Amino acid sequence: MADTIRWLVVFDDTPEMLDVRRCLQDEHFAYLREHISEIPLAGGCKDEPGGDFNGGAWVLEVSSKERAIELIENDPYFKANARQYRLRTWGKAFADHVARL
């Protein structure tokens, strides 16, 4: 993708989001898969292993802030009105290093 900007999105969930996750997980994962070229890294966050999910994080590679917001706000999880987000540009240290997670 030409002229991409890398963005970091940090999601903060409300307590209601646990039910949203159970109800919309399949739609959310389908959405992420559909946009995997623009959202190459995504996952849920917990305060400790074995705890409940209480947020999430994405790394996006898109052409504009507007496109990043569009992707975030069209995700089934976000559309359920049970989470907020912070969006920042993100630069990867050691750009020549490929990280596998």
Image (cartoon, helix red, strand yellow):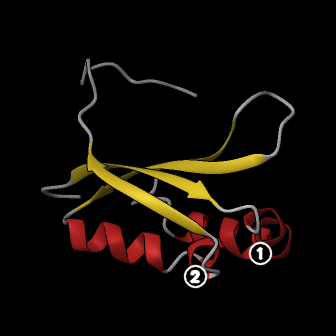
Tell me which residue sits at (19%, 66%) in the image.
64
Q: Is residue 67 left or right of residue 39?
A: left
Query: SS at mark 2?
Result: helix
Viewer-proximal residue among 72 and 94: 72
Picture coordinates of residue 5, whole percent (x, y): 20, 52
Q: Where does label 1 land, which residue?
A: 24
Mark 2 lies on residue? 79
Q: Is residue 97 visible?
A: yes
Around disc 1, counting alpha carbons within 10 Å, would you say few (fewer than 14), some (14 to 19), or many (20 or more)?
Answer: some
Farthest residue to the front: give it. 15
Q: Amino acid at mark 1?
A: Leu
Q: Work out which quarter of the rendered image holds the N terminus and state it.
A: bottom left
On the rendered structure, is 68 left or right of 13?
left
What x and y, as percent, mark residue 33? 60, 64
Residue 24 pos. (x, y %):
77, 75
Q: Amino acid at mark 2?
A: Lys
